[in-house]
Image (tube, coloured by chain):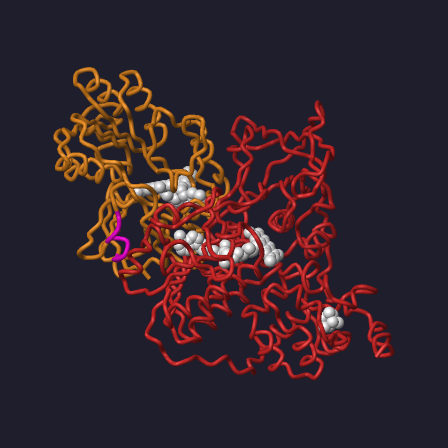
Amino acid sequence: MADKKVKKEKIARQVMPEQEAAVRAKNFEEVPMGQSLETAIIEASRCIQCKKPACVEGCPVGVDIPGFIKLIQEERMSDAISKIWEKNSLPAVCGRVCPQEIQCEGNCIIGKKGEPVAIGNLERFVADYERKKKSADKPKKAAATGKKVAVVGSGPSGLTVASDLILKGHEVTIFEAFHKPGGVLVYGIPEFRLPKEIVFSEVAGLEEIGVNVMCNAVIGRSMTLEELFADGFDAIYLGVGAGLPTFLNIPGENLTGVFSANEYLTRSNLMKAYLFPEYDTPVIKGKNVITLGAGNVAMDSARTALRLGAKTSRIVYRRTMDEVPARGAEVHHAEEEGVKFFFLTSPVKFSGDENGRLTTMTGLKMKLGEPDASGRRRPLPIEGSEFDLECDLAIIAVGAGANPLLTKSTEGLELNKWGYIVADEKNGKTSKKAVWAGGDIVTGSATVILAMGAGRQAADSIHEYLSIGW
Amino acid sequence: MFKIIKRQEMAEGTVILNEIEAPLIARKALPGQFVIIKATETGERIPLTMADTDPENGTITIIYMVVGKSTAIFRDLKEGDSYMDVIGPLGAATHLEKVGKVVCVGGGTGVAVLHPIARGLKEIGNDVTSIIGSRNKDLLILENKMKIASTKLHICTDDGSYGHHGFVTEVLKDILEKEDIKMAVAIGPVPMMKAACAVTKEYNVKTLVSLNPIMIDGTGMCGGCRVSVGGETKFACVDGPEFDGHKVNFDELILRLRAYDIEEKKSYDHYCNLQKA
Ligand SMILES: Cc1cc2nc3c(=O)[nH]c(=O)nc-3n(C[C@H](O)[C@H](O)[C@H](O)COP(=O)(O)OP(=O)(O)OC[C@H]3O[C@@H](n4cnc5c(N)ncnc54)[C@H](O)[C@@H]3O)c2cc1C
Ligand SMILES: Cc1cc2nc3c(=O)[nH]c(=O)nc-3n(C[C@H](O)[C@H](O)[C@H](O)COP(=O)(O)OP(=O)(O)OC[C@H]3O[C@@H](n4cnc5c(N)ncnc54)[C@H](O)[C@@H]3O)c2cc1C
Ligand code: SF4
Ligand code: FES
C-alpha cells in the first residue's frame, strides 16, 4: 500500500493547456483549452482511491469523486458522466467555476505533499467529452404524476430543481425574467471563463426531456405567485438570485462611466456588447479602468475591460491579497493578463469633466487594525492619505443584495433583515405554503454549487410534498 | 414571438404606432407602465411606454419616435412581422387620484405617454386641461385622442403653424395664473419637463414627470437607470418611471442620456449603410 502511494505521487499533475496571457487578454475565447484523453487518463491515475475520500467531504453536493475518476481511468466515459450526474447535473459548468481549491481539491490527500488531483479539470473533461459524444444514457423519466411545478429563475439552482423534478414525473415550467435562460451563468460570468454554448446546451437538454422554459416572464410583474397557483401550479420554487447591485454611496457615483458590475457584465455578456456594432448594445470601453472589489465578479470585470481594449485595468481593494475572495485561478489569470492590484485602498469619490464623464477616482490608503467579527483584520483609514487615480471607467463589484421586485409583491413570504427569503436550511421550505426558495436569494451571493445543492434539497422536498403533502 | 397586428405612421413617418399581440402583458398592464422590446437576436432592449392596452384582444400599443438604430429597426417591421422579445409590464403604475383641476403637459412623443394618464385622470372625475406641443403642425400626434381624454385641450407649435405660437410652458404659466390647479403632469423631452417643472414650482403645484433614462433589464438588477430624486439615487425602472418633478435632477439625467452618443451614432450609421448597400 505504502509502495503504491509513492508511485502515484511521482506522476506530476497534468497541466491544462491555456491560451497565452498576451493573446487571450485580447479575445473572448475560453482561457483553458481543455485536455486530451491521454492526459485525462494519466491525471485520473494519480488518484489513490481513498477508502474515506476527503475530497467528497469537501464537495457541497457529495459527488462520488474517486468513483468517477476510476471510470475515467478505465476509459468508461459514459459511466463516468452518469456517476457525476447522480449528484451534479451541471458538471461542465462546475468543472470550470467551482472553487475547487477550497472544496474537493483543497481536501485531497495527495495535495498534502504535492499537488492535489485535478478533480475540477477531470470533471470538466468528462462533461465536455460527453457533450460531444452524447453516448451516455440520459436518466430515465418516471411516469407522469399530473402535478405542475413553477420554477422562478433559471440560474443554477432553478435549473437543478427543474431537472430533478421533471425526472420524477412532474410537469415543470421555468419562468425567467431575462430573454435568455441561465442566470449568472449567462449574464454574469464571461464567455472566456464559461462559454455560453455550454449553458444553452444544458438548457436545451432540459427542454428535450420536457421542461417548458418561458423567458421574458418577470414574476411579480408579469404574473404574481397567486396567479401562478390560480393557473394550476401545485408548487413554486424561487431561485431568483441576488440580483441587486450595491453602490458605494460616495460622491460622483452617477457620472457617466461609473457602472455596477451587474450592468457592465450584462452589457458585455448577455447583450454581447463586445461584438458591437454587430450586436446593437454598446458599452463604454474604458482606457483606464478601475474595478472596486476583489471577488470573482471583480476579476471578471477587470479581465473583460482588458479584452475590450483597456490600457490599464486596476483592482482596488480595501484589504490585502490574503483576504481576496475570488477563486485562486481567477486571481492568477488576472495577474498574468496584466491586471494590477491596489490593496489597502478605499474609494472616496469620483470626479468628472464638464460633460459628466468620469475622469478620476480619489482613493484613501488603509492599514490593518484588530481582527473583526469574521476574524479578518479590519482595514482602517490612514488620515490624509488621499490620492487620485486617473480613470474613465469604474466598475463597482463590492457585492450584491436581494432584489425586492418579487418578494415585495408576494404576501406571506418571510424575509430576513437584508431582504433575503427565509427558507429551511434542510429542505428550502419558506413561510408560505407550497413555496420553496434556494440559492443566492436565500444565502446571499454564494457559489454555483451551493445554489445547485439547495435546488436538489428543495426538489426532494417538493417531490415529497407532491406525493404526500406539506 | 410577438406579432405586430397594426402599424401606423404619424408625424410624417417620424413616429410609429404598433399594436402588438401580447396577451399576458395586456391582461396586467396599468397606465404609466412600460415594456422592454427587443426586435432581433442581436438587438438592444428598448424601453417603451404602453400608449394603450386591449386586454380583451390581448394587445398592447406602443408609439415611438425613430431616433436611432433600434427604433429604425422597429420602423422597418411591417404588419404581420414580429418582435422577438417583449417584456412587461414594468415600472410602477401611475398613482391616479381625484384632486380636482389637473393640467397635463405633453411634448413630442411624450404625448403618447401622457394620453393614458390624462384619460385615467379624467375618468376618475378630474377636470383635465391638457397642453400638447410639437415643432410644427405636421409633427403633432394624438390630437383627437387627447381632445377626448381632456376637458380642455391647448395646442402649441414652435413655429406657429398651428395653435399657440410658442412653447407649452407659456400656456402652462397662463393657466396656472388663472386657474386653481391642484396637480400637474409633464411628459416629454427632458428640457421640456425641466422647464415645465420650473414654472409649476413657482406656483407650488405638485408635478409628476416620467423619466426615460437608459435601461437594460428594467427589473432593478443593473442600476443603469439611476436618477437623482431629492438627493437620493432611485432606479427609474422600479421606483419610477414617474417621479415628483420638483425633486428630479434633470441636468444629471441629460448628461447620463448622452453616455453612448458616439456609439449610438456609429451604430445608426452602420445600420443606414447596410440598408443602402
Ligand atoms: C460575475 C460573477 C461571477 C461569478 N463567478 C463564480 C464562480 O467562478 N464560481 C462560483 O461558484 N460562483 C460564481 N458566482 C456566483 C454564482 O454565479 C451564483 O452564486 C449563482 O449563480 C447563484 O445561482 P442562483 O440560481 O441562486 O441565481 P442566479 O444565477 O442569479 O439566477 C437567478 C435567475 O433568476 C432570474 N430572476 C430574478 N428575478 C426574477 C423574477 N422576478 N422572475 C423571473 N426570473 C427572475 C434572473 O434573471 C436570473 O436569471 C459568480 C457570480 C457573478 C455575478
Ligand atoms: C421607461 C421609458 C419609456 C419610454 N417610452 C417611450 C415611448 O413611449 N416612446 C418613445 O418614442 N420613446 C420612449 N422612450 C425612449 C426610448 O426608449 C429611446 O428613444 C430608445 O431607446 C432609442 O433607441 P435607439 O437605438 O433608436 O436610439 P439611440 O441612437 O440608441 O439613442 C437615442 C437616444 O435614446 C436614448 N437611449 C438609447 N438607448 C436607450 C435604452 N436602452 N433605454 C432608454 N433610452 C435609451 C439615448 O439616451 C439617446 O439619447 C422611453 C424610455 C424609457 C426609459
Ligand atoms: S482525496 Fe484525492 S486521492 Fe483521495 S479519492 Fe479524492 S481525489 Fe482521489
Ligand atoms: S434598468 Fe437595470 S436597474 Fe433599471
Q: Where residue B222 sits: x, y (%)?
A: 48, 45
In this rendered view, identify the residue nearer to me: B262 or B274. B262
Question: What is the magenta segment's predominant secondary structure?
Answer: helix
User: Is B164 rendered above or below residue A48?
Assistant: above
Left or right placement of residue A98 versus residue A8 in this view? left
Q: Where residue B191 sits: x, y (%)?
A: 36, 28
Q: Residue at x 70, y 79 (%)?
A: A70
In this rendered view, identify the residue nearer to me: B194 or A121. A121
Q: Residue at x 45, y 54 (%)?
A: A240
Q: Which residues are magenta?
A: B21-29
Determine if the magenta segment contains residue A346: no
Q: Residue at x 52, y 47 (%)?
A: A262
Total marks shown come to 0
Left or right placement of residue B127 versus residue B272 in this view? left
Q: Residue at x 31, y 54 (%)?
A: A223
Q: Where residue A126 sits: x, y (%)?
A: 63, 75
User: Is B255 rendered above or below residue B12?
Assistant: above
Q: Where residue A449 sits: x, y (%)?
A: 58, 61
Colour of chain A as rendered: red
Determine if residue B44 is in view: yes
Q: Which chain is orange?
A: B
In this rendered view, identify the residue nearer to me: A273 or B245. B245
Tell me the quadrant of the picture where the N terminus of chain A can be found.
bottom right
Determine if the magenta segment contains residue B27: yes
Determine if residue B162 is in view: no
User: Is A50 rendered above or below residue B86?
Assistant: below
The image quadrant that residue A38 belongs to is: bottom right
Tell me the quadrant of the picture where the C terminus of chain A can be found.
bottom left
